[in-house]
Amino acid sequence: TLPPLEDGTRRVFDQDDLISYWTERCQFTTYIKPDPKLVQAFSSLRSEAPDLVLVAFSNGPRKYCLRILETLGIESFFEGGLVFAVDDILPLCKPQPEAFEKVLETIGCVNRAEAV
């Protein structure tokens, strides 16, 4: 809970409002830029190993993570629900092994030794 306003009005912290605020207002391109070499690396992975499942896993909120992938120009490599964010795994988070287990279980990864 946030401190009350001068008139005594109670303010409540809303996590979704904060996530939306930063996701919509952050100038991502100030900090990160599309990298053609990164896009090429993902394209090569897709071509050379078409059965490889690519998963993005972030401790950031989903909306924020999606904007970063978009800004980097690699969002298309993580279609079909293959982006996992803190919203998806709470109360777990990286680096807890259980967080990784939850993601691997969700994507149906049977042989954990093959996951990178």
Image (cartoon, rainbow, N blue to C red):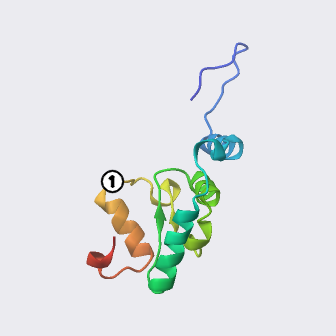
**On the image, which quarter does residue 7 sit in?**
top right
Q: Which residue bears the numbered disc 1?
A: 95
**On the image, which quarter does residue 35 sit in?**
bottom right
Above or below, comparing residue 100 to residue 44 in the picture = above
Above or below, comparing residue 18 to residue 112 in the picture = above
Within 10 Å of the Cα at label 1, are there few (<14), some (14-19), or many (20+) other Cα atoms? few
In the rendered image, residue 45, in percent from the top left (x then y), is placed at: 47, 77
Above or below, comparing residue 87 to residue 106 in the picture = above
Q: Is residue 110 visible?
A: yes
What amino acid is labelled 1 in the image?
Pro
Q: Is residue 81 visible?
A: no
Outermost residue on the left side: it is 113
At horizontal 29% and vertical 60% (from top left) the residue drawn is: 97
In the rendered image, residue 116, in percent from the top left (x then y), is placed at: 34, 70
At horizontal 41% and vertical 68% (from top left) the residue drawn is: 103
Outermost residue on the front side: it is 37
Element assignment for label 1: loop
Instruction: Describe residue 44's horizontal placement relative to residue 5 as left or right.
Output: left
- Give 59 or 43, whichever is nearer the viewer: 43
At horizontal 46% and vertical 52% (from top left) the residue drawn is: 59
Check the picture and name the quadrant holding the N terminus: top right
At horizontal 33% and vertical 74% (from top left) the residue drawn is: 115
**On the image, which quarter does residue 15 sit in?**
top right
Above or below, comparing residue 69 to residue 111 in the picture = above
- Give 5 or 74, whichever is nearer the viewer: 74
